[in-house]
Image: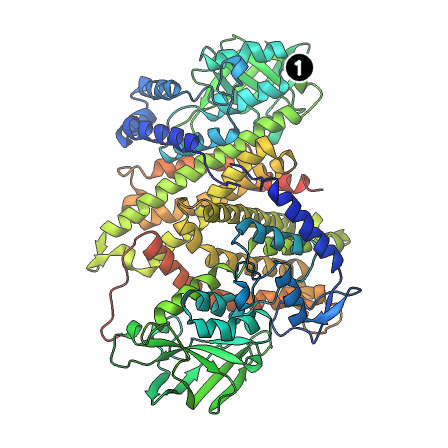
Amino acid sequence: MYFGLSEEQSFFQDNVKKYLEEHATIDNIKHITSGDEKNLSEEIHQGLLNLGINGLLIPEEFGGLGLDLLFAAVVSEALGGGVGPTPFIAPYVMAPIAIMHAGTKSQQENYLSKIATNEFRFGVGFSEFIGKRNDAGITFSDNALNGRAMFVLDVNDATHLLLADEKGQIFVVDAKSSNLEIVQLTTVDKTRQYSEVICTNLEVELLENSSDSIEPIKQAIDAGRIMLAADSLGASQTMIDKAVDYAKERKQFGRAIGSFQAVKHMCAEMAADLEPCYALVWHAAHCHDHSPDEARLMACHTKAHVSEMSKGIAKKATEVHGGMGFTDLLGLHYWFKRIGLNRQILGSPELVREEAYKTQV
Amino acid sequence: MDLEYGPEYQDFTKEVQDFCKKYKGISFTGGSNTPLASSGGSGGPEMSRSEWQKILIENGYFARSVPKEYGGYGGEVDILKNRIIASEFSKSKTPGPMGGQGIDMLVPTLLEMGTEEQKQTYIKPTLHGEMIWCQGYSEPNAGSDLASLQTKGELIGDEWVINGQKIWTSTAQYSQMCFCLVRTEPDAPKHAGISYLLIPMDTPGIEIRPLVDMTLNAGFNEVFFTDVKIPATNIVGKRGEGWAVANATLGHERGSLAPPDATMNRVNMLMHLMEKETLDGKPLIEHPIYRDRLMQIQGKVLAQQSHALRLLSAKLNPGADVKIGKMIQKLIGTELRHELEGLAIDVMGEIGTLYEDSPHLRNDGTWQFIYMYFLGLIIGGGTSQIQKNIIAERGLGMPKEPKVEGA
């Protein structure tokens, strides 16, 4: 019995962390999020591709590494920790899993092998399957899509999109099609891209095994939720580390502010809230591949619970920094905002907990 | 990640399951002295708790790694087997061994630091449930700052003469013995002046006054010592080393107060209750706000269960970094259990306030009882605030509060 990360997983995670520490410096993040260095984000993405993040989950027969979701979770954690300004969850986790479960053999062959070689990069828009806001939503008839997907992840530089209708049917869309209008959204978190996609008589390819089963899209959403939880886990750990360091350094009333219980108890609460999240994220990722009976419940609770803990940590860690935490100068807000976005994507805590309940009745 | 225990444990699991079947519905004569301890079921064999202890030891389901000569089973330490035993007993509702401070704290202490004679004298009757112990640590003026305790022990001839007062002494009224922290070196610095003494509770000069707590149980006592004389050899470790001896066992207590599997059992019990109880004709579970609160707690308990697996794995595979992971256990475990019991009260509303033997009581009034009882556990054994100091200072390396002159 061994509950934890393997040496390979820790090693890979360390490599991603080191890469981000060197290249996604706070200065670079500032350039990327202010939009004055458009190529920098793609350079960082390329560096991570060189480490192999695109092929982690793709089976070996299609040129990938065929690893478990836990491997992807540790990468996601590292990306959250370093506010990695690069697509990951949509193109390299949700898309491969959706295609593996929903695609025919030839669709798998066609798309997965090209994700592995980085010829294809997918954005993913499944939000309306989880919860339709106002008049958003996509309908499929006569081999064409019409309607709006309001929140599509990682559209920039994508060659293709996966979109879904209310029934959970998954469609492959050519991102360059003229029947597709892409409206870039501005969220608080500028380290990642969110877009609205409007389809007008857009010709698409249905991933065939999703036509009569919602299981494929559910699998992709479960995995995406675990990745978002892992991302928030990493981001929260960085915020705690920064808060603890600051509280040891910063002096007021002639002593380090970390020696005041009001401050140190906030730090202890953050650590106590976050520590069990490691085990929860690892366990959920493990169940996704190896324990199907528990997998969905674990994925839902992991997304909801880590989102709740991270929200509290983002607030407290900022407060420990006092006025400096509120400034743009320090850049702590990148992590705060990353956590804020993760919380809402693929189902906010209330929605996901309701789903957790429904898996039990 | 590998959550399988391996084939050699499958046979063992089967063996434990068979054992539990054999003793299904076992009940005890004489009841139970400790709150929350099972008094057994019905329809099965009837015996005393002490007899049950002996059966458990003979089969290796309790005191597994305690040597035979001291009344244990004499097996190897096997963390996974311990877990299998706990989990199969819990699933089949088979009552586990008696706990209590003698078994949980004194026995490990004596095994580690006791003299041969002390081990021979005390461990066996303690394990068998024939010798009950109480813990004499806290005093009216030594709570969180335990090391400032003032109960005095003077070595006169070949006897310790003890004077002072202890408080929060659980089970003192049933106990034959007390393991007690006493200031024996008044001139030494405060942590270095304490000794760990073993005091027979029938010694003249001991007075026990019950202390009724908010649950209306007399779970605690005040214990007064007036010229209590015990043999000089009733000391564990050397003079002035009592603080170190006690700390070895305090760590043990903190981890074991609120195991997440037990909390999950209560979550399942609450879910069941919410399916049966109705409000305005609708089961409570169909009310979205109550349902969401239950799901929030279920998520927290799942996180703690996964965390417990991580800690279990760290015991099996030394080298894993779980320093903070261990420190948070008392804090998060007791707080969560209190929160869960409180939720049950909230969803029942007025019915949730019923207590003792009131009409309309649900689940024997355990929700209110445990809700209050766990507030006691949040405070006892190092308050949540003290736990946060420990996590921050020892776990995160944050600076201590400046010392106050004379403290």
Res A174 seen here: no
Q: Position of residue A236 (x, y in %)?
A: 40, 41
The image shows residue B183, relative to residue B89, as above or below, that is: below
The image shows residue A136, relative to residue B111, as above or below, that is: above
- Residue at image coords 45%, 69%: B110
The image shows residue A303, relative to residue B359, as above or below, that is: above
Q: Nearer the viewer, residue A193 or B144?
A: B144
On the image, which quarter does residue A336 sit in? top left
Mark 1 crowd level (few <14, some 14–19, many ≥20, 10 Å Cα): some
Relative placement, left or right, of A254 versus A195 is left
Q: Quadrant of the C terminus of chain A?
A: top right
Mark 1, secondary structure of its residue? helix
- Residue at image coords 64%, 67%: B54
**Residue holding disc 1:** A208
Query: Across the whole image, how many numbered discs are drawn on residues?
Result: 1
Q: Amino acid at mark 1?
A: Glu
Q: Nearer the viewer, residue B366 or B312?
A: B312
